[in-house]
Image: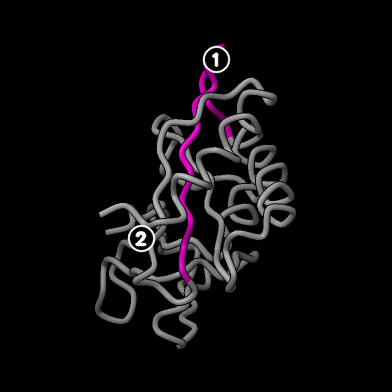
Amino acid sequence: MTHPFVPQIIEIATPVATELGLELVHVVFHTNQSPPVLRVDVRNQQQDTGLDDCERMSHALEAALDVADIIPDAYVLEISSPGISRQLVSDREFISFKGFPVIVSTSPPHSGHQEWMGQLVRRDETAVYINQKGRIVAIPRSQIVRVLLDEPR
C-alpha cells in the first residue's frame, strides 16, 4: 500500500529530477523503520547512473522537501538507482552510504560469522564498523571479502 505522502513527494521530486537531467523511477516511504526511510530511485538517461547523480538529487530534493514541509517528523532520505552498483569500494562510497543497511562478507569467518548485516557506521584503516541494533561491531578489513548495500525488505 502506498503511503499518503508519496503522491506529494512525486509531485515535488519529478521536477527536481528533471532539472538535474534525471528520471524519477520509484518512490517508497518505509514507515516501519525508525526513523522512517524515504527511498527515491532515479535514473540518468544519458549515461549509467552514478554516485554523483544520487548525491546531487539528494541535496536538491532534501532542500525542496524542507521548503514543502509535508513530512512532519524526522526521516532518512535515501537516493538510489536501479543501475547503481551494490558493492562499496571507495572511501567516498563508504562516506556517502553511512547509515545505509549493508552486508559485510568475511573470509575467514570473523567471530564465527561469515556474513554481517547492519547499518554502515564508518570505515577506517583497520576495520569497517556496523551498527547491529545499537551495538557497534568492528570487522577487520583484512578479513573482509566485500561490502554490499542491502536491499530494504
Range shown magenta: 36-50
C-alpha gap between disc 2 and disc 1: 27 Å
Where on the picture, by quarter, is residue 25?
A: top left
Residue 136, placed above or below residue 49: below
Residue 72 percent location from the top left of the image:
59, 70
48 magenta-colored? yes
Mark 1, secondary structure of its residue: loop
Magenta stretch: includes residue 99: no
Q: Residues within 10 Å of mark 1 (few under 14, many from 20)?
A: few
Residue kind at label 2, given as amino acid type: Ile
- The residue that mark 1 highlights is 47
| Residue 15 percent coordinates (x, y) | 63, 29
* Residue 148 place in picture, x, y as percent: 39, 51
Amino acid under disc 1? Gln
Mark number displayed over residue 7:
none
Residue 103, disc? 2
Q: Residue at x 40, y 84 (%)?
A: 133
Image-quadrant location for residue 77: bottom right
Determine the secondary structure under disc 2: strand
Kindly identify the residue that appears in the image at 52 percent across and 24 percent down.
23
